[in-house]
Image (cartoon, rainbow, N blue to C red):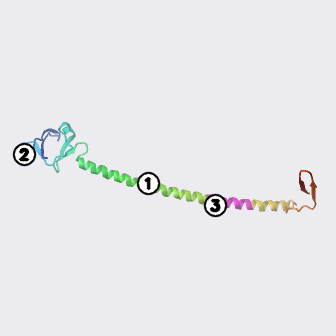
Amino acid sequence: MEIAVYLDDSRNIINVNDTNDIAAEKQAKEKGWTLIQNSDPAFSIDKMFKWTVRESDNKLVYKSTGKTLDEETKKSLTNLTKEQLNDSLTKAQLQMALTTLTKEYIEDRANSNLVTTELTRQIADLTIKLDKVMGIDPTPKVPTEIKSVATTDGAVITAQ
């Protein structure tokens, strides 16, 4: 639908002729009036103060953004898509970081176990050497005498 709008010096819409296409075309021939072809269906005379006409293409646009409703919708969808892609990248990056940290933790844990085992072996070797220096034989001794005692509760075997 075509409408004619009257703009003041600040490009505010102060009057609208939306009776029919022919009336709008005739009105647009008057000084100060502009013909809007294919007017935006979101445009409302009650809220014409929120709208203006873009000089480059004579389209009704919101004053706040300088865009038509379609342009705003496309921009919103584009931004939403970009945000979703960014979120996807962030999730993938977080998963990769978590995998890397887990792998490092497992490797550190394995290395820690190896270090603990090696330290235990070295302490045992040093203990044996220290015992030898102090004249203690670290070799376990086999008992020389074995006693067995029989009781009514059962047999008790002791070694000396």
Q: CA distance from mark 1 to mark 3?
A: 31 Å
In the picture, measured across the screen, residue 57 lies left or right of residue 144, that is left
Q: Give the residue type that dot 1 points to.
A: Thr
Instruction: Look at the picture and state if 108 lies above or below 42.
Output: below
Instruction: Look at the picture and state if 116 lies above or below 8.
Output: below
What residue is drawn where x is 22% and y is 42%? Answer: 63
Q: Give the residue type that dot 3 points to.
A: Asn
Q: Position of residue 100 (x, y in %)?
A: 53, 58
Q: Quadrant of residue 14?
A: top left
Q: Quadrant of residue 5?
A: top left
Give whichever of 148, 112 is nearer the camera: 148
Q: Are the residues at dot 1 and dot 3 in contact (C-beta closer than 8 Å)?
A: no
Q: CA distance from mark 2 to mark 1?
A: 56 Å
Q: What residue is pinned by disc 3?
A: 111
Instruction: Look at the picture and state if 128 lies above or below 74.
Output: below
Magenta region? 109-121
What residue is drawn where x is 41% and y is 55%? Answer: 88
| Label whose residue precedes the other's in the sequence (2 or 1) | 2
The numbered mark at residue 22 is: 2
